[in-house]
Amino acid sequence: MELIDGNRIAAEIVSDLRAEVAALPGRPPCLALVRVGDDPASVSYVKNKEKTAAAIGIAGRILLPPATISSDELFALIDQLNGDPAVDGILVQSPLPPHLDELAVFRRIAPAKDVDGLGTVNLGKLAQDDDTGFVSCTPAGIMELLARSGVRLAGRHVVVIGRSLLVGKPVALLALQKRAGANATVTVCHSQTRGLPALARQADVLIAAIGRAEFVTADMVKPGAVVIDVGINRVADPTRKAGYRLVGDVHFPSVAPLAGKITPVPGGVGPMTVAMLMKNTLKAYRQQHGA
Ligand code: NAP
């Protein structure tokens, strides 16, 4: 079994981006990070993104509207960022409070600044194999992890568990694309799938994006398969100072010994998501400045 080290691969990308940003003429790229309310996981995700942006030389503009913000007020804030020439990329951290329509918020972001790639235009471009758009960061990070770990997808069977707009659906489309680095045969499973363990066992590459702690067990994995664990789940652990620990959607202790390659949680997909957000921000800057 080989561990796919997301921390190391993300650090390489961050270091390449730092060099690219340092060589840009004019002002640095600017990423607006909008966090509504103070959901604890979102607080830590946004802090992490702010820190990585600073390390690369990308200016972070942090906006922290209260959880009580109305749809109209949030739309007005996004419109203002859309129209601000000093802002290149916009990310609205999910989840949003339940009174806000997340999809409507993602759609409001101007396509040219939609660095999270969740708006209609960018998801459409993904389905059209058009690489001028922005691919949402976690799926893009998964593809990058696979490519940089020497995993070839062409003709192989990728099974994705989860069909969310954020992860499952876009990563399935990416693996399916007709281009070098993709060309996989793809199966997507979800909560209504019948015979999921048998389908998962057919996977050469198994991608788990379910949001259920340690859902994937050894009986669902073909020996030698590549296992990508997207899940980030908090489970109570009184021995930890925080009172919890993070586990993935894969039961690592039983799956790791039989996997060919596997990502750990934490330290697998998570750091890649942040690195790809920065990559998308630089792409947005270049597109808007012709740089
Ligand atoms: P989500 O929106 O809740 O989607 C979960 C998907 O899993 C849904 O498609 C759901 O099916 C499916 N599912 C749930 N229970 C199932 C079951 N018993 N059998 C089969 N399928 C089942 O979650 P998400 O946003 O995709 O996130 C998934 C996980 O990845 C979470 O742990 C999240 O924290 C993590 N995540 C990590 C990163 C990162 O950077 N590492 C980024 C994003 C998310 P239905 O569609 O039928 O409901």
Image: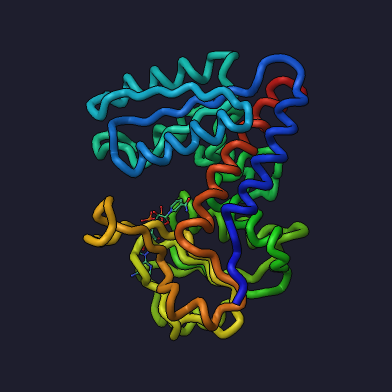
Residue, x 46% and y 81% (percent of image)? 220
Relative height, residue 291 to residue 131 (above, below): above
Q: Nearer the viewer, residue 250 or 92?
A: 250
Residue, x 52% and y 81% (percent of image)? 257
- Give percent across and percent down for residue 117: 55, 40
Q: Quadrant of the C terminus?
A: top right
Relative height, residue 127 to residue 40 (above, below): below
Q: Name the colour scheme.
A: rainbow
Q: Is residue 104 left or right of residue 137?
A: left
Residue, x 67% and y 74% (percent of image)? 156
Res 196 seen here:
no
Relative height, residue 113 to residue 119 (above, below): above
- Give percent across and percent down for residue 282: 66, 31
- Give percent across and percent down for residue 274: 54, 43
Relative height, residue 197 to residue 88 (above, below): below
Res 152 seen here:
yes
Q: Quadrant of ligand 1?
A: bottom left
Q: Quadrant of the N terminus?
A: bottom right
